[in-house]
Image (cartoon, helix red, strand yellow):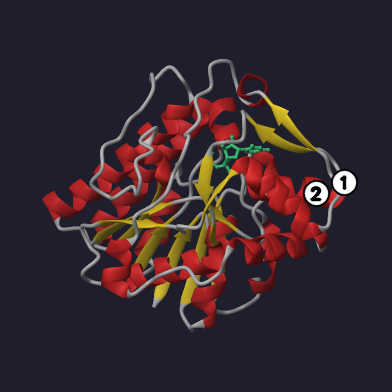
Amino acid sequence: MRVLITGGAGFVGSHLTDALLARGDQVVVLDDLSTGRHDNIRDHIGDHNFEFIMGSILNEALVDDAVRRVDVVLHLAAAVGVELIVGRPLESLATNIRGSEIVLEKCHKYGRKVLVTSTSEIYGKNDSDLLSEEDDRILGSPLKTRWSYSEAKAIEEVLAYSYWKEKGLPAVIVRLFNTVGPRQVGHYGMVIPRFVEQGLKGQPITVYGDGTQRRCFCHVADVVQALLGLMDSREAEGQVFNVGSQEEISIADLAVRVTERLGSGSPIVKVSYDDAYEEGFEDMPRRVPNTARVKDLIGWAPTRNLNQIIADVAADISTR
Ligand code: UDP
């Protein structure tokens, strides 16, 4: 199979690239290297099954040509990370809304199956026990920039779903919950690479807010298996799936865990949300996915725990 991965030089995209090439597929990566890194795909340059196109999903002609030449599209290109969204909202909205629309238009034009990666941010402040795919979204004011990411990804979801429903485009939607692992970088705000890097360097570990907010972190290698399984499944078309771990931890406890696992003497400090992001920033108190749907369809469940994640991220950061 010939697969186009938009955002294939990014954190999740590059792991997907590795996995697809390893199983014998051909991979075309389209990436503008805005947050993706050439280093992530460097090992494949020169491989006759691999092609790298440097460019944006906002470039219609480029997307048209890339989609035309493949069988399946995995759409991962996006502006991600709360810091980036809050810092550059207009650019983020254009990439996430118009960029996704262009990718879907071209998939429809050439009749290519597409998997779009959405996010747990979709659920906003809904912190109910286990978030299921049909649960309500609870969002703050659209003028709080944080929520613009949720809005943009919701539009992407409804576009993909409508192309499936109205026009029969084979489309699968996946909502990723806090995916972490090697190659993720901390400068867009992601907590695990930040804490691990701070811990390795003996710098203060920065817990935002009071640290009672809770998350479940899923290893990217597990996420890749879910994405491949869903991409390969006919039954997944027209559906949305949560993908994530259910091993829940507060951010304050995560800071302690990171220092313990690394044997780090880093102090743990609290930073207010206003200082960390912007005035009036609203965080999600808790986010735990119900993953019964993906488990029932393809038998997927995560296999790596938080301690393995911390060890893998530490090994990666140490060798950068
Ligand atoms: N966070 C933190 N310190 C940091 C970076 C993030 O305490 O240096 C917090 C952040 O406010 C959030 C949680 O860690 O409550 C997870 O943040 P991340 O950006 O990794 O993912 P999110 O769940 O916000 O999408």
Ligand 1 located in image quadrant = top right
> Would residue 317 be seen by someone viewing this image from the given angle?
no
Residue toward you, 158 or 216: 216
Image x and y of residue 105, in percent: 28, 48
The CA span between labels 1 and 2 is 5 Å
Quarter where residue 217 is shown: bottom right
Q: Amino acid at mark 2?
A: Gly
Work out which quarter of the rendered image holds the C terminus and state it. Answer: bottom right
Image x and y of residue 145, in percent: 48, 23
Image x and y of residue 309, in percent: 63, 62
Whether disc 2's CB lies below 8 Å from ligand 1 is answered no
Residue toward you, 307 or 166: 307
Q: SS class of the residue under badge 2?
A: helix
Give above or below for 9 relative to 47: above
Whether residues under marks 1 and 2 lie with C-beta atoms below 8 angstroms apart, the answer is yes
- Residue at image mark 2: 199
Image x and y of residue 104, in percent: 31, 50
- What is the crowding at mark 1: few (fewer than 14 residues within 10 Å), some, or many (at least 20)? some
Q: SS class of the residue under badge 1?
A: loop
Residue visible at 77% across and 51% down in the picture:
259
Give above or below for 234 relative to 283: below
> Would residue 124 be seen by someone viewing this image from the given angle?
yes
Quarter where residue 141 is shown: top left
Whether disc 1's CB lies below 8 Å from ligand 1 is answered no
Work out which quarter of the rendered image holds the N terminus and state it. Answer: bottom left
- Residue at image mark 1: 202
